Image (cartoon, rainbow, N blue to C red):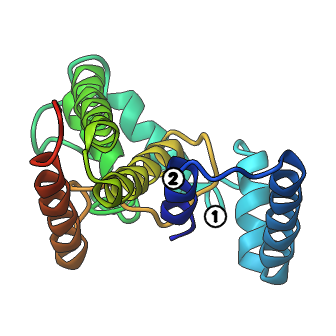
Amino acid sequence: MIVASMSIIFASGIKIKARYIIAFLLIVLIAGGIFISAEEFRMKRILSFLNPEEDIRDGNWQAAQSLYAIGSGGVFGLGLGQSRQKYLWLPEAQNDFIFSVLGEEFGLVGTLAVLGVFTFFIYRGYRIAITCKDLFGSLVATGITSVFALQIFVNIAVVTCTMPVTGMPLPFFSYGGTALCINLCAMGILLSISRNCKSA
């Protein structure tokens, strides 16, 4: 919700002084630090991320198994349905770590193809927002596209151990009927907005 709100505020052309932005970022960092340190399991995730080679059997189990899955896929992958890590080794293989299974079964070629489709999707979403004749439609398109972009970025960053493990699903790939339904509704709204564009 914060990402959607901030992207809409930014796209609306609001003028905010630099000191307010810096103050907001500092507040977010301090609040985030307090939130993380309040629970032991959150601190454990951060420490595990900072020391990826340690504690592979406990705190770093998910991240390590994710990298094993992606690495074993090679260039062309093991084939559809041939993933081995998803059987009791890779936790939450059906939702949070579905991209790892994708990398193992379809390899580098498959993951690059999926990333290409996602990149084109995000480009088209922002293109719709820019070319929309209606200001409200433009802002809604910006918010929808930004939320999808964040989910895609965070999920792939977690799977490739670029950021700490968190429960962010991959849109249209991760298991979950409710999430898929909401994503399709968002796509319907975005396509409806695209009908009111100059040239999308």
Please state which of residues 185 and 151 is positioned toward the viewer in this rendering: 185
Position of 24 with respect to 84 (left or right) is right
Residue 14 percent coordinates (x, y): 63, 53
Q: Is residue 127 at least partly visible in the picture?
A: yes
- Mark yes or no: residue 97 visible: no
129 relative to 25 in the view: left or right: left
Q: Quadrant of the C terminus?
A: top left
Q: How many marks?
A: 2
Q: Amino acid at mark 1?
A: Asp
On the image, the x and y values in percent for residue 159 come to 47, 46
Q: In x, y percent, where is residue 87?
A: 27, 58
**Label at residue 193:** none
Quarter of the view holding residue 171: bottom left
Residue bearing the label numbered 2: 12
Distance in Å between CA atoms under marks 1 and 2? 46 Å
Task: State the residue in front, 35 or 82.
Answer: 35
- Residue at image position (79%, 57%) is 47
- Compared across the picture, whether 104 is left or right of 65 comes to left
Instruction: Choose between 63 and 156: the one closer to the eye.
Output: 156
Determine whether 4 is above or below 132 in the image: below
**Labelled disc at residue 58:** 1
Hey, what amino acid is under mark 2?
Ser
Disc 1 + disc 2, Cβ < 8 Å: no
